[in-house]
Each structure stands twice: as structure tokens, then as C-alpha cells.
């Protein structure tokens, strides 16, 4: 098999370590990059080599393309794995790698660009026969057009930033009277956050499940899917818990959503590993929402139920190898759940920086912890607050739930506050145990607390 001799990892924390692990198993040497504040961290220690790329601020280190490309050049790395966040969805970065003769581990720059243009992705896939939420055909230019589209769609509608994410530039509009104000504020917010004021419109779906499908595609255009993940447990557009399979989907819907994901990936001539996000409403209608062109935080739940190492597959596909799997060879076994453990107050979700003075990780059958944490680590405030991912796998959802409760009870982190108590509350809730939750779950849980 064609493979790289050395890969540079343009990231930090647990995902950098996850990528180092995949490289080790493939016999590939690794280069870590780090900011000055990350000098004494585990991804630096676990890589074969490490290069300091700048000060603590992301802008001057993990987002600084020239520093990262220089680090790849001086260490003779043939490829760069961007992980998630940082430069992972920056098409210019992918192009800059290629120009420097370095393989970007991920999809084609055109795929990344379309992933960042949600209005266009929606428009293209609608034309190709993939169902999208009723709404505008691409960007709505002004308030008059927005009013026309909204009346046709029917209120309430949702204004969304075309190049956005994370809920910024998003507005629910209940009636025509509110539209002008909402349109203007959403435009301003989008411009400030993303540098583009472009908005598009979707019918607002008040109760739904966020279900996403993992896919893999090779350079010949073969595409397989690896089942779905339910990511409906979110707070302020941050995912907190993910599981696979989705408890809200039956065999028939599962088959349909998988086929739609493959149809979308083929229509976009997608390459490498990616995720198609869908809305599933209470009647079981499926609508395409977005495409994510990176490896995602929650990829381990898919790895657990498929037994496939997604990072290794990304690397092998980027080196030009064909898909090793046919759809009929992909079998989903048991049930997996992931809890994201953040350095945050478990009630207010405000950041809780500090030094980890004690750490005990859960283990035993069916338990996986992806983390870069260690006792004595000073959790920096410069980056996101994820400190560990706790993933459990069981023969069915019941066993996975018991295992997650058991593992959360074993987990000990001292010195900082974490979201472990929040996860305990979710796992003991009837609604979560029944698996009947929707995207409104967290607000209802917090209202009852
Ligand atoms: C929606 C929606 C209702 N209708 N789109 C999109 C980005 C994601 N972060 C939130 N998004 C939503 N898009 C339409 N047409 C409701 C949400 C939403 C949501 C989605 C998934 C999980 C939690 C959520 C919480 C609030 C709103």
C-alpha cells in the first residue's frame, strides 16, 4: 500500500494524540507542532518530533499557515493532518499545502469551499434530488426577497448565515412584522463573525433530531456510509453527547438516510472522509442541512460500532489508495455513546481554567477515553475547553447506558470544574433513557434543575 513516511499534525490536544496513534500503527513518523503555552503537553511528548510554531494565541500558532508549512518543510513531512477546528476547513490552507508539495489529508479544496457555503450546498443538492428544508434557493439578497420567500415557505422561518456556523447569524422569525429587524441584525452578526453578510432562509422546525451520516469516498468516486450519529444533545450549538445508532431512527429511515448521504457525496464528487448533517423531524421527514469536510470530534462512536479506524482510513485514502470496504462489508454492531467532558462549570457552562491536581481515567470493558490531560496539566484558556471524550460501547443501548453511568462514576478530575455532573444528570433522565429526546432536551433539562 502507498503511504507517507512522515506526517505533520497541525493541531493539539486529544485529536493530535488520536492522529499520532493512527500513524504509529501505520508505521508513519509524526511531527507535532505546538504554541509556546503548549510546550509541556502530551501531544508534544508522544510525537516523534515537535516544532514550536509561535505564541499562545491561535492566530499566531495553530492558525498561522506560514509557520506550519515551514515546520513541515524543515522536518520533511510529506503530508499534513489538520484534525478538527483550526485550519481543517480552510480551502486556502489545503491549496497552500498542495502548492508546497505537501498532501493535505482531507477532501478536495472545492469540497471544503462548498462545505463553507451552506446556501450553495443546499441549492446544489436540492437540484440533484436530495431533500432540503423548504426555503430559499441560495442566498436572499434583501428584505423584500426575504419576505417573499418567507411568505411562500410559511412562518416561522429561520435566517441562517450562508458561511456561518455555531448559531451565529441565526434568527427565528415568527411573522412578517419581525422580518426586517431580524434580517438586519442577522446580516450584521454574520458580517462580523464570518466576513460575509449573506443569509439564506429555511422553514423553522421546532422539534427535531440532528442526525449525521459518516461517509468515506476514494479518488475513483466510490462512496460508502458508516451509519449515523445522533447529535441532538446540544447547548448553544455545542454538542455535548453523541450516539450511534440514533435511537430515533428505525431500520427503514436508517437505510434511507444512508442512501441520501451517498447520493449527496456522489453529487458533490466528494473525496476522503466526511459527514452529511440532516434534520429528522417528528414525522420522520429527512432534510439535508450541511456537509462537514473534516474528521469530527464525535468520530469515535462510529469507530466503536463499525470497528473501522477513521483516521487510518483518512490517511490511506489521502495517499491515493482505493476504499477497502464495500457497503455490504460494513456492519454496525451494538451501541456507542460519547460524552464530551469540558473544563466548564456544569450548570452555567462558564469556562473553568486551572491546574488539574488529580486525574483518574475510567476503563474496563467497552470504555475508551480520548484525552491529552494529565495530572499537573494547566488547562489553558486560549483554546476550546474539551478536556476528554468518554466513549462507551455496549451490545445494545441499555448496556451502553449502564456502562456510561459506571464510567462517569469512576472518572475523577480535581483542580478544575468539569461537565461530568451534567452528564450524570442527562444519563439519569427518563427522557434520555427512553431515547425519545429532541434538540430541545437540554433547555428542558436545565429548566427542571
Ligand atoms: C434549524 C433548526 C430548526 N429549523 N434549522 C442549525 C445549526 C445548529 N447548530 C442549530 N441548528 C438548527 N437549525 C431549521 N430549519 C434548529 C436548530 C437548532 C438545533 C439543531 C440541532 C441541535 C440543537 C439545536 C438547538 C437549537 C436550534
Image (cartoon, rainbow, N blue to C red):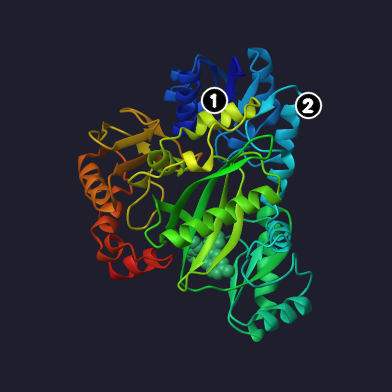
Q: Position of residue 107 (x, y in %)?
A: 66, 38
Residue shown at the point (63%, 82%) measured from the top left: 154
**At numbered mark 2, what does the secondary structure look like: helix, strand or loop?**
helix
Furthest residue toward front? 328
- The answer to whether residue 165 shows anywhere in this view is no
Q: Position of residue 135 (x, y in %)?
A: 67, 72
Question: Is the residue 109 above or below the residue 196 in the image?
Answer: above
In the picture, the quarter occupied by the C terminus is bottom left
- Mark 1–mark 2 Cα distance, whole angstroms, equals 23 Å
- The answer to whether residue 45 shows anywhere in this view is yes
Quickly name the residue at label 2. 99
The circle on residue 34 is 1
Q: Position of residue 170 (x, y in %)?
A: 60, 65
Q: Position of residue 329 (x, y in %)?
A: 47, 39
For this rendering, which residue is in front, 2 or 81?
A: 2
Residue shown at the point (37%, 48%) measured from the top left: 344
Earlier-in-chain disc, 1 versus 2: 1
The circle on residue 404 is none
Residue shown at the point (70%, 34%) measured from the top left: 94
Whether residue 88 sits left or right of residue 377 in the image: it is right
Amino acid at each position: 500500500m502507498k503511504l507517507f513516511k512522515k506526517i505533520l499534525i497541525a493541531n493539539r490536544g486529544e485529536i493530535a494524540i488520536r492522529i499520532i496513534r493512527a500513524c504509529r500503527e501505520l508505521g508513519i513518523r509524526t511531527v507535532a507542532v505546538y504554541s509556546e503555552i503548549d510546550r509541556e503537553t502530551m501531544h508534544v511528548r508522544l510525537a516523534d518530533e515537535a516544532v514550536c510554531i509561535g505564541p499562545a494565541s491561535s492566530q499566531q500558532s495553530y492558525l498561522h499557515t506560514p509557520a506550519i508549512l515551514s515546520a513541515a518543510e524543515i522536518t520533511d513531512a510529506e503530508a499534513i493532518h489538520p484534525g478538527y477546528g483550526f485550519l481543517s476547513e480552510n480551502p486556502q490552507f489545503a491549496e497552500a499545502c498542495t502548492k508546497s508539495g505537501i498532501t493535505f489529508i482531507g477532501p478536495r479544496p472545492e469540497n471544503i469551499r462548498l462545505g463553507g457555503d451552506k446556501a450553495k450546498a443546499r441549492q446544489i443538492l436540492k437540484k440533484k434530488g436530495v431533500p432540503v428544508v423548504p426555503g430559499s434557493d441560495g442566498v436572499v439578497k434583501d428584505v423584500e426577497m426575504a419576505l417573499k420567500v418567507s411568505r411562500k415557505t410559511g412562518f416561522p422561518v429561520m435566517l441562517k448565515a450562508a458561511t456561518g456556523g455555531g448559531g451565529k447569524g441565526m434568527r427565528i422569525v415568527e411573522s412578517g412584522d419581525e422580518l426586517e429587524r431580524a434580517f438586519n441584525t442577522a446580516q450584521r452578526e454574520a458580517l462580523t463573525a464570518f466576513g460575509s453578510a449573506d443569509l439564506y432562509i429555511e422553514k423553522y422546525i421546532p422539534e427535531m433530531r440532528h442526525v449525521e451520516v459518516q461517509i468515506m469516498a476514494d479518488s475513483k468516486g466510490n462512496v460508502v456510509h458508516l451509519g449515523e450519529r445522533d447529535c441532538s444533545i446540544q447547548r448553544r450549538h455545542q454538542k455535548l453527547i453523541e450516539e450511534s445508532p440514533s435511537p430515533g431512527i428505525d431500520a427503514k429511515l436508517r437505510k434511507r438516510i444512508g442512501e441520501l448521504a451517498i447520493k449527496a457525496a456522489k453529487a458533490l464528487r466528494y473525496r476522503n472522509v466526511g459527514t452529511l448533517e440532516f434534520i429528522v423531524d417528528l414525522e420522520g421527514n429527512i432534510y439535508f442541512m450541511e456537509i462537514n469536510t473534516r474528521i469530527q470530534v464525535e468520530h469515535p462512536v462510529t469507530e466503536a460500532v463499525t470497528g473501522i479506524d477513521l483516521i487510518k482510513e483518512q490517511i490511506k485514502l489521502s495517499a491515493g489508495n482505493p476504499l477497502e470496504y464495500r457497503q455490504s462489508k460494513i456492519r454496525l454492531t451494538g451501541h456507542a455513546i460519547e460524552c464530551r467532558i469540558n473544563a466548564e462549570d456544569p450548570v452555567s457552562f462558564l469556562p473553568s481554567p486551572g491546574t488539574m491536581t488529580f486525574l483518574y481515567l475510567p476503563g474496563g470493558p467497552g470504555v475508551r477515553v480520548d484525552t491529552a490531560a494529565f495530572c499537573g496539566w494547566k488547562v489553558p484558556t486560549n483554546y476550546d475547553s474539551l478536556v476528554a471524550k468518554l466513549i462507551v460501547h455496549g451490545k445494545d443501548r441499555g448496556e451502553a447506558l449502564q456502562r456510561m453511568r459506571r464510567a462517569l462514576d469512576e472518572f475523577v478530575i480535581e483542580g478544575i470544574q468539569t461537565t461530568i455532573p451534567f452528564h450524570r444528570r442527562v444519563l439519569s433522565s427518563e427522557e434520555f433513557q427512553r431515547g425519545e429526546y429532541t434538540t430541545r432536551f437540554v433547555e428542558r433539562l436545565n429548566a427542571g434543575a
